[in-house]
Image (spheres, grey):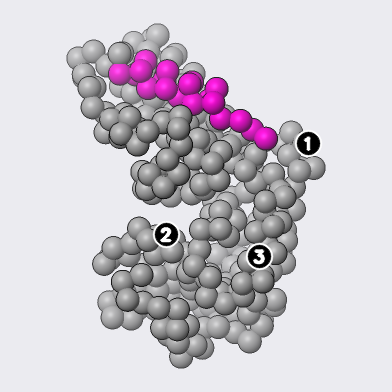
Amino acid sequence: MNGIDTSNWLQVLQDRGLIPQDHLAVSVVGSVAQGWHNDQSDFDICVVTSGDSGSPGRSSIPMPLNPPHIRTEMFYLDDRRWEVTYWLDSQYEQMLAKISRDEFDRGLAPVRVLNPREELALGRLEACLVLLGAPWFEKRRKHLAESAFQSFMVSRSLASADDCVEDALGQMESGNLESATLSARAALGYAVDALLEGHGSYGSQAPKWRPNRLKAASPPALSFEDYWVLETMQGYDPEDPRPWINGVLTICQDIAMRVEVS
């Protein structure tokens, strides 16, 4: 992490009074935790507490949970932006309840189960750098593995990809090739997300990291080289985009057949 060790992270947070006494877990999340950061990247910290009254966050973000918010604190150090987000352990309980096996078996529409921040928070349980509270992470990761989180995410992405494929086909048939191109590009993104989620790599709410996720997961169904050719629209002919659109849709449908919803 470019010379930043665990003790330095904790010292900065403790010196500013940003780790409350009732903390259960503290982690670094986002691009820094993945090793994808650069000199301009923000430092994102997640703090889990047992109670709400001790969280020092000054701003609150509405959430469909009880309490209906999470708190955040932001500061700058050496021209680097730090953002600390405070979650309650009980809020993780609520999020995990939304994605239980029983809830999945009820046939709920997966796109409406979690909001983007909830999805991001759960996906980061594995993809984070633990600073404090390793037992809490061990417990919550076990709960996540036993849930239907992966099934919900894969189902959501596959359904979105299928909707975009249908849109692209209809738009091509009507001669609206510009919209068909955009729909095909959207279908590709959703299909690749489904493929990655099927391999336990989450983060579709941050599409800028999709190439990094694909490189890291290296799924046999799609090489990075083949994906990048499509993502960067190599071979796209504005005068006759149908071959490119059809090629992308074929790849999307092939991925859909390879990804299993367990």
Local secondary structure at mark 3: helix
Residue matched to label 3:
138
Checking the image for residue 1, the label placed there is: none
Kindly identify which residue carries mark 1. Answer: 106
Look at mark 2 in the image and give the residue it sits on: 34
- Give the residue at x 61% y 72%: 134
Work out whether 110 lies above or below 255. below
Structural distance between the alpha carbons of marks 1 and 3: 28 Å
Q: Is residue 163 visible?
A: no
58 sits to left or right of 148: left
Q: Residues within 10 Å of mark 1 (few under 14, many from 20)?
A: few
Q: Label 1 vs label 2: CA separation?
A: 34 Å
Query: Which kind of residue does numbered mark 1 sit on?
Result: Arg
**In the rendered structure, does residue 245 fall within the stretch colored magenta?**
yes
Where residue 53 appears, as percent x and y from the top left, is: 66, 81
The image position of residue 206, as x and y in percent, is 43, 49
SS at mark 1?
loop
Task: Tell me which amino acid carries mark 3.
Answer: Glu
Comparing 160 with 131, the one in front is 131
